[in-house]
Image (tube, rainbow, N blue to C red):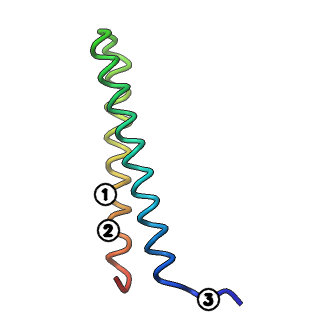
């Protein structure tokens, strides 16, 4: 039987949050390059993706707080 280990779950959330932050940083670089290249359509798309990814991060941040930690 698989036992529920709160430390493993907390560690998984931390890894997920780190990966989301890496993705946000990458999206920011893409948006910056698009703006530098005056490609405003791609810049807007990157900014929209950054907004969505940031919203996801904000939701994930609240999840472990609802548990025992």
- Identify whether 53 is placed above or below 34: below
The residue shown at (34%, 28%) is: 29
Is disc 1 surrounded by few (<14), some (14 to 19) or many (20+) residues within 10 Å? few
Q: How many marks?
A: 3
Front tag of 2 and 3:
3
Task: Kindly report the distance in space between the C-alpha atoms of the residues bearing marks 2 and 3.
Answer: 23 Å
Residue 10 location (% of width, % of height)? 43, 74
**Disc sitting over residue 62 in the figure:** 2
Q: Which of the 4 image quarters holds residue 68?
A: bottom left
Q: What secondary structure is found at the residue carrying circle 1?
A: helix
Tell me the residue that label 1 is attached to.
58
**Disc sitting over residue 13 in the figure:** none
Looking at the rendering, in which quadrant would you find the N terminus?
A: bottom right
Residues at discs 2 and 3 in contact (Cβ within 8 Å): no
Looking at the rendering, in which quadrant would you find the C terminus?
A: bottom left
Task: Kindly report the distance in space between the C-alpha atoms of the residues bearing marks 1 and 2.
Answer: 7 Å
Could you tell which of marks 3 and 1 lies nearer the N-terminus? 3
The residue shown at (32%, 47%) is: 54
Residue 55 location (% of width, % of height)? 33, 51
Is disc 3 surrounded by few (<14), some (14 to 19) or many (20+) residues within 10 Å? few
Residue 2 location (% of width, % of height)? 67, 86
**Disc sitting over residue 3 in the figure:** 3
Extreme right residue here? 1
Could you tell which of marks 2 and 3 lies nearer the N-terminus? 3
The residue shown at (38%, 33%) is: 27
Q: What secondary structure is found at the residue carrying circle 3?
A: loop
- Identify whether 63 is placed above or below 37: below
């Amino acid at each position: 039987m698989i036992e529920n280990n709160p430390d493993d779950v907390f560690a998984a959330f931390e890894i997920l949050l780190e990966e989301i932050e890496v993705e946000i940083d990458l999206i920011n670089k893409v948006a910056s390059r698009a703006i530098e290249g005056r490609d405003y359509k791609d810049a807007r798309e990157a900014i929209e993706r950054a907004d969505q990814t940031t919203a996801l991060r904000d939701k994930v941040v609240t999840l472990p707080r609802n548990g025992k930690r």
